Image: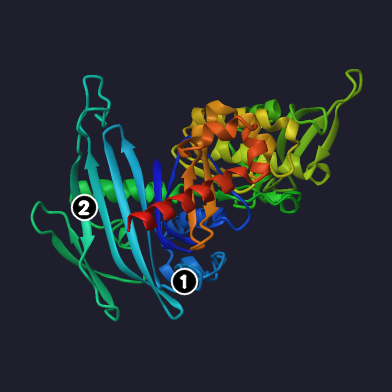
Amino acid sequence: MITELRMENWKSYAQSSLYIDPLTVLIGTNASGKSNALDAFIFLNRIACGAMLTSALQGDGALPPMRGGIEWAAQRPGKKFALEIISRADKLTDYEYRIDCRISDTRCELMAERLLMKKYRSDKDGQRVLEKPGKPASKPRTVRLFVTDPCPDMAPNITARLYNEKKGTPKSLGRAHAVLFQLVGQRLRQEIQDGVNSVISSLKDIFYLDPIPSHMRAYSPLADKLDADARNIAGVIAALPTAKEIEAVLTRYAGRLPERDIRRVYAETVGKFNSDAMLYCEENWQPADAPHTVDARGMSDGTLRFLAILTALLTRPEKSLLIIEEIDNGLHPSRANMLLEMLQTVGKQRRIDVLATTHNPALLDAMGTEMIAYITVAHRDSKTGHSILTLLEDMKRLPALLAQGTTGHLSSRGLIERSLQRSLDFEGLSEFGNA
C-alpha cells in the first residue's frame, strides 16, 4: 500500500510530501494545490496501466486530458518534474519508486527512473525496528532493483541497470513509457519481479472517484468495475455474486441519511436479456403503509454520491487507494459523523485507504482532536507561490489555534493558512538574519 507521495517541481509544488494513512483528509483554500497533489496519483496510475507519458498528461482517445494538460505538468518556468512513492509490501519491506520526466514541446519524455527495495530488521515480535529517542536509527538494507543511466535529451532509448549483485545488467528501453511498465511480463530476477509487481499493483489500484449524479440515474449495463463517475453503479451491484450482502450494507448506511426514510437499497436487472440494471430504494414513512419504490431518477444528488462512495469502498480490491474530491459534497452536515464512521469502518474491514479533500467545517469538527493526525493542509507560500503540504499536527502554533475554536472553525476563517504563512515569513526572516 502507498504510504507516501513525494513531488518535485510538479505543477504548483517545488518540493513536498503527502503521507497516506487509512484515512487522509486534505484541506486548504481554493488554488492551494489540493487538486495538483491528487493529479500526481492520477499520472502515476495511468503510466502504470500502460499509458505513454505524453498521453497520461494530455490525454488520447481512451484517456481524458489531465487538468492543465502537458503545459502545466512541470512547475514553470522549468521543464522537468519528478514523482516518487513509497509502497509498503509487508511489515519489513518497502519499495521506493521514482520517475523523472522532461517536457519537450508537446511531448513528455523519461529522464530517469529507479526502483529501490528496503528491508528493515525485525524485533522479537516480528515488527520492523524503527528509530527510537536517544538511540540511532536502524537503517534498512537497500537494494537497487533497477536504476537508469544518465540519458542525453535527444536519445531515443534509455538504459536501465537491473540488479545482479554487481554493476547491474544493462537493458535498453524506450523513453515514451515508464521503465516500470516495460518490465512487466519479462523474465527477471525474482527480487526485481517481486518489486515491479508490487509497485505496479499499488499504482494500478489507485482509483479516483468523481461521482456525477446526473450520470447515475440511467440504466447501466452489468459490469465488474465501477466507473470513475459511478455511472454504472447499478450494473456493478447487480452483477456481484455477493449483491445481497452489498445491498444490506448500502441499506444500513443509507437508512441513516436525513432525506428520506430509506428501508432498502438494491439494484435489479431489467430488459429482455437482463443485461442492464437500475438502482432502486424503498421508502416507508408510515409503518402501516406499503413501501414506496423509487429508482435512481428520483433520488437526491447527495444520496447518489453517498451510495457511489460506499459502493467503491465495498467493491475495490483490497489495498487500494480511493481518492475522492469534496467527499461530503451534497451530504447534510448533520451526517458528517456517519460519513467518517463509514469511511473508517468499511475502509478498515476491506483494507482500503481513503484520500479525500473537503471544505466542510462540519466534517472537520466531526473528526475532533483525536483525528488531527489524519489532516494535511495545502497552502501557498505568498512569496514564491509554491504549494506546500503540512501535517496539521506538525504546526507549532496548533495548541494556541485550537484554543480559539474547533478545526472546522479555524479552517472556515482561514486561521490555519494565515498561521502557516506567518511561520514561513518568520523562517525567512531568521535565514536572512543568519546570512
Q: From this viewpoint, which residue is outermost toward the front?
A: 433
- Residue corresponding to mark 2: 145
Task: Specify the amino acid type for callout 1.
Answer: Arg
Task: Specify the amino acid type for callout 2.
Answer: Leu
Q: Is residue 232 left or right of residue 79?
A: right
Question: Residue at 75% across / 48% down in the picture?
Answer: 271
The disc placed on residue 76 is 1
Between the residue at mark 1 and the residue at mark 2, the CA separation in whole angstroms equals: 32 Å
Disc 1 crowd, CA 10 A, few/some/many (<14, 14-19, 20+): some
Disc 2 crowd, CA 10 A, few/some/many (<14, 14-19, 20+): many
Kindly indicate the quadrant of the structure image that contains residue 53: bottom left
Residue 299 position within the rendered picture, expressed as x and y whole percent measured from the top left: 80, 41
Question: Residue at 26% across / 57% down in the picture?
Answer: 114
Mark 1 or mark 2, earlier in chain: 1
Quarter that holds the N terminus: top left
Quarter that holds the C terminus: bottom left
